[in-house]
Amino acid sequence: MSATIEQTTPATTPDTSGESRRAVRIGICGLGTVGSGTVNVMARNRDEIAARCGRPVEIVQIGARRDNPACDTSGVDVSREIFDVAANPEVDVLVELIGGTTVARELVLAAIASGKHVVTANKALIAEHGNELFAAAAEKGVTIAYEAAVAGGIPIIKSLREGLVGNRIQWLAGIINGTGNYILTEMREKGRSFEEALRQAQDLGYAEADPTFDVEGIDAAHKLVIMASLAFSMPLAFDKVYTEGISGVSSEDIRYADELGYRIKHLGIARGTEKGVELRVHPTLIPQRRLIANVNGVMNAILVSGDAVGPTLYYGAGAGAEATASAVIADIVDVARTLESRPEERVPLAGVARGSQGGTRVLPMDEVVTSYYLRISAHDKPGVMSQVASICSDQGISIEALIQHEPAEGEALVPVVILTSRAREARLREAVAQIEALDTVEGEVVRIRVEPLG
Ligand SMILES: NC(=O)c1ccc[n+]([C@@H]2O[C@H](COP(=O)([O-])OP(=O)(O)OC[C@H]3O[C@@H](n4cnc5c(N)ncnc54)[C@H](O)[C@@H]3O)[C@@H](O)[C@H]2O)c1
Ligand SMILES: N[C@@H](CCO)C(=O)O
Ligand code: NA
């Protein structure tokens, strides 16, 4: 089917010099949550977008397997074959919203080969194939814009690549998976089960097609590596990120953390050290008084600390149809604004000029230094604490706080909760192995890292 979009603005808009400029022609591939959100927001805010671009922005084609009742595509050429969009000479900018890394990679390469700019919300694609795609785009003199890929509607890519460009970034830490934060919040505030909260997040359109990506930290690792690449001018190194998800976080640990004055949040952390950059994603205890500890539900927040500016905080909806569409459209406008500029005058895709990325070392997890929350299931016998304290002390670790309640009626095991001093990961692991080997201790010791973030 093919027809013209109903016009509420003229197909040309006067630019500041008074000349009329032709519309920027957009092709959207994928009409799921983000695709339909983008169509809706573009239709609703079309006059504002045209005014901000200095020219109309028109969706000329959509590639979708099926129609989506969440948006109105009447008047737009809809093809069931997404590669039609990549081949369409009428399309200036291809917007990839299908997700995944196989077909999406082929689609983006095809679009680049035919000289189109690309906008994508696909963090998996950028994190895993970004080095290749950026090189292909640079060869062709086109742009790949990926604001929606990290922290949904929060303009964090723009902040890192433009707003903070005068700084040396020291570290960044963020709640960068909306689904995970939604689950942890529902568990803590409403006592919901993990499974129930995940189902709700899926119903609300927050989760990835495969929700293991959200729950096991893979999605956060994708986003972290993209931010770290910009912050530390290094190639995308997804396979080097230490990744732990939230599936092991229990309601019990959330309660003990509260008792100690902390919240458990799933964080992505990138920190520059003299020996290399730490890249890690894991549940983290954060002091309750920190703003980021109070970021709840689907909201995301990222702290970025620069040598000149100090700590800065970015907060907003990390997932959802229209919040993500906000970032997709920001990218479309960015691309549209520079359509006629020479490639070397545009903001570099990877944040630095081609060939200027350093081969920064990613620090092995064993060398990371942090504090820990440990929960030990111990038999209610005298001497357990002194054994645990002596093992920790042998590894140079001291105990900063301790919770030990009376065992529940009829229970032989009593939970012992400890906050440790800062220690090297390797030393902590050794101490935990020795604690687990004690006759007086049952099962595995729960360990969650603690970050003061200030
Ligand atoms: N949902 C969010 O809140 C959110 C936020 C930020 C980024 N993202 C990213 O945006 C992308 C899309 O996510 P979504 O939530 O909209 O997913 P979705 O599953 O709702 O939508 C994807 C759509 O693409 C279609 N599709 C997949 N392969 C196709 C093919 N070969 N041909 C035609 N259609 C195809 C699917 O049928 C589906 O309609 C993903 O990369 C995701 O990681 C999503
Ligand atoms: N599944 C992702 C979507 C936004 O990238 C999340 O929950 O954060
Ligand atoms: Na963003």
Image (spheres, helix red, strand yellow):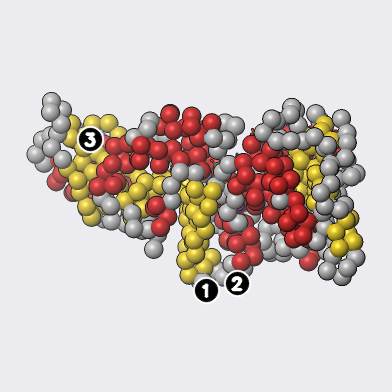
Where is residue 3? Give x, y as percent: 88, 36
Q: Is residue 312 left or right of residue 82?
A: left
List the residue tagged with mark 1: 308
For the question of whether residue 427 can be seen, the reply is: no
Q: Are marks 1 and 3 in contact (CB under 8 Å)?
A: no
Tell me which amino acid carries mark 3: Ser
- What kind of element bears circle 1? loop
Q: Indicate the quadrant containing the C terminus: top left, top right, bottom left or bottom right.
A: bottom left
Foreground mark, 2 or 3, reads: 2
Q: Secondary structure at mark 2?
A: loop
Mark 2 crowdedness (10 Å alpha carbons): few <14, some 14-19, many ≥20: few
Residue 400 location (% of width, % of height)? 23, 55
Provide residue 175's location: percent of width, then percent of height: 48, 49
Circle 1: residue type:
Ala
Identified at 82% across, 58% down, the residue is 55
Q: Which label's residue is closer to the chain start, 1 or 2?
A: 2
Quarter of the render that holds ligand 2: top right
Give the number of the disc on residue 377: 3
**Amino acid type shown at disc 2:** Gly
Res. 97 mark: none
For label 3, the SS is strand
Q: Quadrant of residue 47?
A: bottom right
Give the spatial CA distance, label 1 vs label 2: 8 Å
State whether residue 340 is above or below residue 196. Answer: below
CA–CA distance in space, label 1 to label 3:
46 Å
Q: Which residue is mark 2?
A: 166
Residue closer to the observer: 307 or 293: 293
Q: Residue at x 34, y 35 (%)?
A: 191
Mark 1 touches mark 2? (CB < 8 Å): yes
